[in-house]
Image: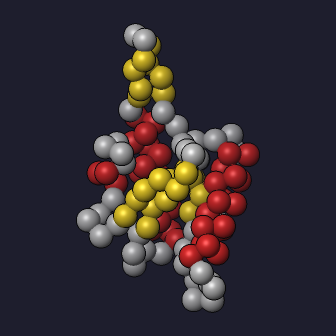
């Protein structure tokens, strides 16, 4: 999380949903702004690396970005759109940001 922390504000929250999935909540941020934050996170991960057994391993991530809409019945609706965006990002070759 140290690599991602510089990308978020004090009012933002991020945490692990499960498996390899993280969720970032960006209050008062529109879809375009959220995509910029996700791109900064992607870039920070890509610029860092993981060292193991004397070898450097690159870090990458696929991001799905969604905005809460007034007619969303629950937070699950937003997460579902973001999840679909993430799978589209993976289908595009991974290590990209895809707006939902």
Q: Quadrant of the C terminus?
A: bottom right
Question: Residue lying furthest right in this view?
Answer: 91
The percent coordinates of residue 54 (x first, y second) are 40, 10
Name the side, left or right, on which 5 lies relative to 60: left
Q: Quadrant of the N terminus?
A: top left
- Above or below residue 28? Residue 19 is above
Residue lying at the far bottom of the rendered structure: 71
Q: Is residue 78 visible?
A: yes
In this view, 64 is above or below 12: above
What colour-coding does the image apply?
Answer: secondary structure
| Residue 99 seen from this side | no
**Where is residue 8, by image quadrant?**
bottom left
Residue placed at 49% from the left, 59% from the top? Answer: 23
At x 69% / y 60%, what residue is drawn? 84
Q: From this view, report whether residue 97 is shown above or below residue 32.
A: above
Residue at 56% from the left image edge and 76% from the top image edge: 75
Q: Position of residue 94 (x, y in %)?
A: 64, 41
Q: How many marks?
A: 0
- Examine the image and state in which quarter residue 37 appears: bottom left
Q: Is residue 71 left or right of residue 51?
A: right
Furthest toward the left, the residue is: 10
Q: Residue at x 39, y 78 (%)?
A: 28
Question: Vertically, is 26 above or below 96?
Answer: below
Q: Position of residue 45 (x, y in %)?
A: 43, 39
């Amino acid at each position: 999380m140290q690599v991602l922390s510089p990308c978020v504000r004090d009012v933002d929250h991020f945490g692990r949903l499960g498996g390899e999935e993280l969720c970032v909540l960006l209050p008062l941020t529109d879809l375009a702004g959220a995509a910029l934050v996700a791109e900064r996170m992607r870039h920070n991960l890509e610029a860092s690396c993981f060292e193991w057994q004397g070898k450097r391993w690159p870090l990458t991530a696929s991001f799905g970005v969604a905005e809460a809409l007034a007619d969303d019945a629950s937070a699950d609706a937003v997460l579902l759109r973001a999840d679909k965006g993430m799978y589209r990002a993976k289908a595009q070759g991974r290590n990209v940001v895809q707006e939902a």
